[in-house]
Image (tube, coloured by chain):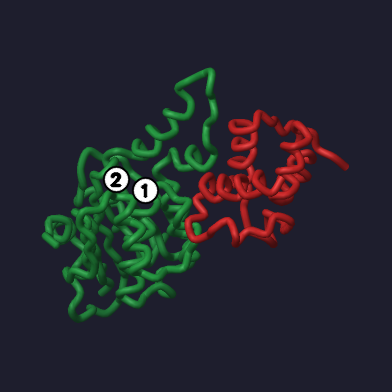
Amino acid sequence: MTGYYITGYCIIRNNEASVNGKPVFSAHGKNTREFFTDLYKFLDSDYPKFHKMDNLCKLGFLSSELILKKNGVRTIFSGSDTGVILANSSSSLDTDRMHQVTIINRAAYFPSPAVFVYTLPNIVIGEICIRNKITGEGSFFIQEKLNPVFLTDYIRCLLDCEIINRCIAGWLQVDGDDCDAMMCLIEKTDKPISGFVNFEPSVIRDIYNLRI
Amino acid sequence: MEKLVQTLKEEIIEALNLVEMVPEDINEEAPLFVDGLGLDSIDALELTVLLEKKYGIKIKTAEEGKKILYSVKSMADCIIAGGKAWD
């Protein structure tokens, strides 16, 4: 019987990062931007485009790098049968504010292309897909808080309908120095996978509530 | 000219977030796009804004943009010529 499993997860918050429940990196006393740069260097990702991304994209990129690298599954989570389903509560507001600063004064109206290209939250999905050659379903939802039931139902529907066979899913919240990310790898398999947990709302909730 | 080229290199690094580069890494005569720094279309827009914001130069056509934004030197030449592109 086909089952859906969470085969890896990571959390980034409070200037710390963990993978599968184990702390892997911390850099206290830094602001969000500095922390992201330090984590990028730690991951040794060699992807110069990272430096051009806004903070939401950086958070998504770093979360996906962490979870795919540390679980050794980058080549598996690729192609048209992999989806990326994400959510947060502040959309791209962090970057929207930066954009507003550049257009608020009509006498000095210089919108920055490098900023306004990131004034949509789903751009982070594109960045993750480009990096990992993922061409499957992608959606970004704006919700007041993490909704494990919605997330699970939505992804289960995609898996049931065979639109995707695996998914990168999670919560990516960044607004100023408020940074909170949880990302999971979900896989469909005909055989139960030892050591992996069922893809259920309660498990998503438990992972999100884990302390690093 | 030399000072302007140096300033432009610093401004390009800052505007395009080329955090892993220093001005010495940029050859002022090398193409900025594709072969040289490997910049993309968003970077081209950012450089267009930079020229207008800092030097009051407005690029009017794509063809003009290709010439002016070819290299750091071509940008500096354009600034010195008061915003005129050349053939």
Q: Are marks 1 and 2 on the same chain?
A: yes
Tell whether B37 sits left or right of A117. right
Estimate the x, y position of residue A44 in percent, counting from the top left.
40, 70
Q: Tell me the SS state at disc 1.
A: helix
- In the displayed orientation, state which residue is furthest to the top: A107
Look at chain B in the picture and name its colour: red
Q: Tell me the SS state at disc 2.
A: strand
The 10 Å Cα crowd at callout 2, few under 14, some 14 to 19, many 20 or more, is: many
Q: CA distance from mark 1 to mark 2?
A: 7 Å
Q: Earlier in the sequence, mark 1 or mark 2?
A: 1
Chain letter for mark 1:
A
**Chain depicted in green:** A
Residue A11 visible, this orientation: no
Q: Which mark is residue A55?
A: 1
| Three-letter amino acid code at the position of disc 2 | Val
Count up the numbered dots.
2
Residue, x 42% and y 28% (percent of image)? A100
Residue A63 visible, this orientation: yes
Q: Which mark is residue A91?
A: none
Estimate the x, y position of residue A46 in percent, counting from the top left.
46, 68
Above or below residue A110? Residue A30 is below
Q: Which mark is residue A174?
A: 2
The residue nearer to you, when weighing B34 against A28, is A28
